[in-house]
């Protein structure tokens, strides 16, 4: 039986305590597989554990517990062999700002044994694809944030890796560049059979993935195809605003046998044929409903269904 491209088995990681902060458990027994040829997304809010998992898979960080394998190679025991098969784009820039764009690309190629005419050809192709041909001889430090991101992407793909790891790849890219990135990733999978694993907090980006793992507070909240995950909601999503959400929720349960979830001061009901249920609600509780909305399930609804809170609630509370 062929080993999966990525096998994550009960991976946990604890960042040790520092002078002003206690120890922090960033990953809590995460397990899932990525099959060869997939575009697999790890979706979650900031602080959910995505970047920690990414660092472990890229061999930059050792897990505290569990194990991770890439094409059957242990990321701890076989780290050097694993690195040869990876193309990695970290969330933070890794360009040498004192070298030109072309020189950064040349360095990357030589690290992976690509030289001569073949290296020149691959550099030209990468720069052209990401709209950087005119900046080839500019110093990396003179580029905008989005341009630097595009160089990072071109550089990571130069050696045609078997597995491409992308940590928040769309950060700093304009909408057009984001579309081009996804077109390129799908082309790579089709033409070369490349496996792509990315982390993201963009719902629309996650929709493009073959399968997803949803991370929340270091735990695996759900996994599956975007369509299958949304199908578990079981119909439509009804959101109700009321002056007394708790009281209205109790009355809805008593009258219709449906227990709304109360979240952030509103009521949420997951139900098939929601369009037919809304008139019944409004008629049954005149004056008690301020607003009511109906939508088809989204990945954010899946996240709320599995975790009991909104996708960005923690970040928003911290900012407040």
Image (spheres, rainbow, N blue to C red):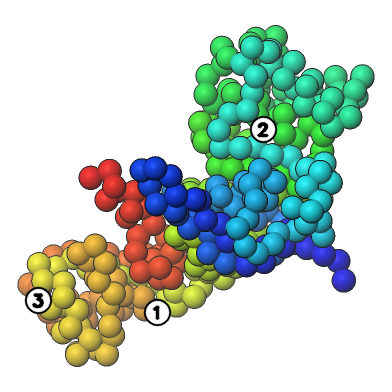
* Circle nearer the viewer, 3 or 2: 2
Q: Quick check: 300 left or right of 195?
A: left
**Residue placed under numbered mark 2 in the picture:** 153
Kindly check if marks 1 and 3 are in contact, taking CB atoms under 8 A apart as contact: no
Q: Position of residue 57 (x, y in %)?
A: 68, 50
Q: Residue placed at 24% from the left, 62% from the top?
A: 264
Of the image marks 1 and 2, the number of the one nearer the N terminus = 2
Total residue callouts: 3
* Mark 3 nearby-residue class (10 Å; few <14, some 14–19, many ≥20): few
Kindly check if marks 1 and 2 are in contact, taking CB atoms under 8 A apart as contact: no
Q: Quadrant of residue 19?
A: top left
Residue 246 disc label: none
Kindly check if marks 3 and 2 are in contact, taking CB atoms under 8 A apart as contact: no
Residue 52 in view here: yes
Q: Give me the C-alpha separation between circle 3 and circle 2.
A: 56 Å
**Residue placed under numbered mark 1 in the picture:** 272
Q: Quadrant of residue 105?
A: top right
Q: Position of residue 85 (x, y in %)?
A: 81, 45
Of the image marks 1 and 3, the number of the one nearer the N terminus = 1
Q: Position of residue 42 (x, y in %)?
A: 57, 55
* Mark 1 nearby-residue class (10 Å; few <14, some 14–19, many ≥20): some
Q: Quick check: 109 left or right of 273?
A: right
Q: Give me the C-alpha separation between circle 1 and circle 2.
A: 43 Å
Q: Secondary structure at mark 2?
A: helix
Q: Quadrant of the C terminus?
A: top left
């Amino acid at each position: 039986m062929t080993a999966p491209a990525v096998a994550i088995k009960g991976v946990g990681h604890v960042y040790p305590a520092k002078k002003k902060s206690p120890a922090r458990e960033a990953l809590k027994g995460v397990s899932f597989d990525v099959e060869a040829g997939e575009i697999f997304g790890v979706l979650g809010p900031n602080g959910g554990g995505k970047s920690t998992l990414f660092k472990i898979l890229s061999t930059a960080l050792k897990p505290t517990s569990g194990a991770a394998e890439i094409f059957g190679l242990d990321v701890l025991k076989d780290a050097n062999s694993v690195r040869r098969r990876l193309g990695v784009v970290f969330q933070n820039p890794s360009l040498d700002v004192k070298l030109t764009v072309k020189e950064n690309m040349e360095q990357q190629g030589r690290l992976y044994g690509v030289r001569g005419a073949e290296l020149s050809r691959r550099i030209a192709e990468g720069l052209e694809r990401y709209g950087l041909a005119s900046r080839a001889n500019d110093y990396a430090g003179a580029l905008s944030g989005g341009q630097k991101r595009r160089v990072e992407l071109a550089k990571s793909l130069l050696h045609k890796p078997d597995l491409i790891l992308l940590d928040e790849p769309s950060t700093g890219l304009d909408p057009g560049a984001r579309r081009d990135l996804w077109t390129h990733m799908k082309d790579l999978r089709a033409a070369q059979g490349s496996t792509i694993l990315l982390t993201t907090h963009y719902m629309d980006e996650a929709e493009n993935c073959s399968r997803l793992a949803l991370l929340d507070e270091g735990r695996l909240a759900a996994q599956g195809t975007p369509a299958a995950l949304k199908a578990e909601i079981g119909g439509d999503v009804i959101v109700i605003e009321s002056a007394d959400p708790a009281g209205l929720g109790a009355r809805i349960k008593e009258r219709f046998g449906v227990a709304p979830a109360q979240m952030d001061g509103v009521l949420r009901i997951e139900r098939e044929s929601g369009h037919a249920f809304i008139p019944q609600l409004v008629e049954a509780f005149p004056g008690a409903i301020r607003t009511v909305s109906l939508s088809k399930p989204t990945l954010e609804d899946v996240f709320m269904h599995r975790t009991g809170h909104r996708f960005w609630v923690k970040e928003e509370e911290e900012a407040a």
